[in-house]
Image (cartoon, rainbow, N blue to C red):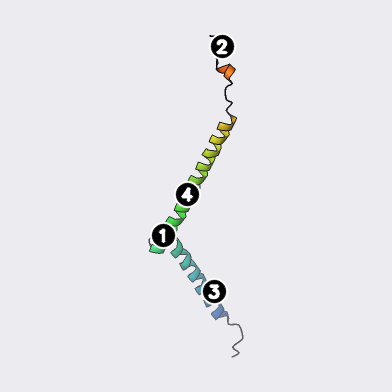
Amino acid sequence: MDQDAPDPKFDAMTARLLRREALRRAAEELNTTSGPGLEDMLARISAEVTAEATGARVAKESSARADANSDPKPSPDLAADPHGA
């Protein structure tokens, strides 16, 4: 038997084992009951919450700056009593 000849049974078994290992690793990554899985999930949630809070704060500050820059200051003449008192 030629060692370089393709072996369909071996190829099928190898492909099945590779798929099984890939699925096992993906499941382990998503598993929140294991230490590393839970730690990764909490890190992702923390990053998302931080990004949302930062975005909201930046939007609020930008809006406040825009409002402060667009509010006209009353001139001294308008601040006086309109009836001349």
For the residues labelled 2 and 3, the Cα–Cα distance comes to 88 Å
Q: Residue at x 48, y 64 (%)?
A: 26
List the residue tagged with mark 3. 15
Q: Earlier in the sequence, mark 4 or mark 1?
A: 1
List the residue tagged with mark 1. 39
The label on residue 50 is 4
For the residue marked with disc 2, what is the amino acid? Pro
Which is nearer the eye, 20 or 50? 50
Question: Comparing marks 1 and 3, which lies closer to the viewer?
Answer: 1
The label on residue 82 is 2
Residue 27: image x %, image y %?
A: 45, 64
Question: Comparing marks 2 and 3, which lies closer to the viewer?
Answer: 2
For the residue marked with disc 4, what is the amino acid? Thr
Q: Earlier in the sequence, mark 1 or mark 2?
A: 1
For the residue marked with disc 3, what is the amino acid? Ala
For the residue marked with disc 1, what is the amino acid? Glu
Which is nearer the eye, 1 or 56? 56
Residue 43: image x %, image y %?
A: 44, 56
Q: Residue at x 45, y 63 (%)?
A: 29
Question: Comparing marks 1 and 2, which lies closer to the viewer?
Answer: 2
* Label 4: how many Cα within 10 Å (few below 14, some 14–19, many 20+): few
What secondary structure is marked by label 3?
helix
Residue 54: image x %, image y %?
A: 50, 46
Q: Earlier in the sequence, mark 1 or mark 3?
A: 3
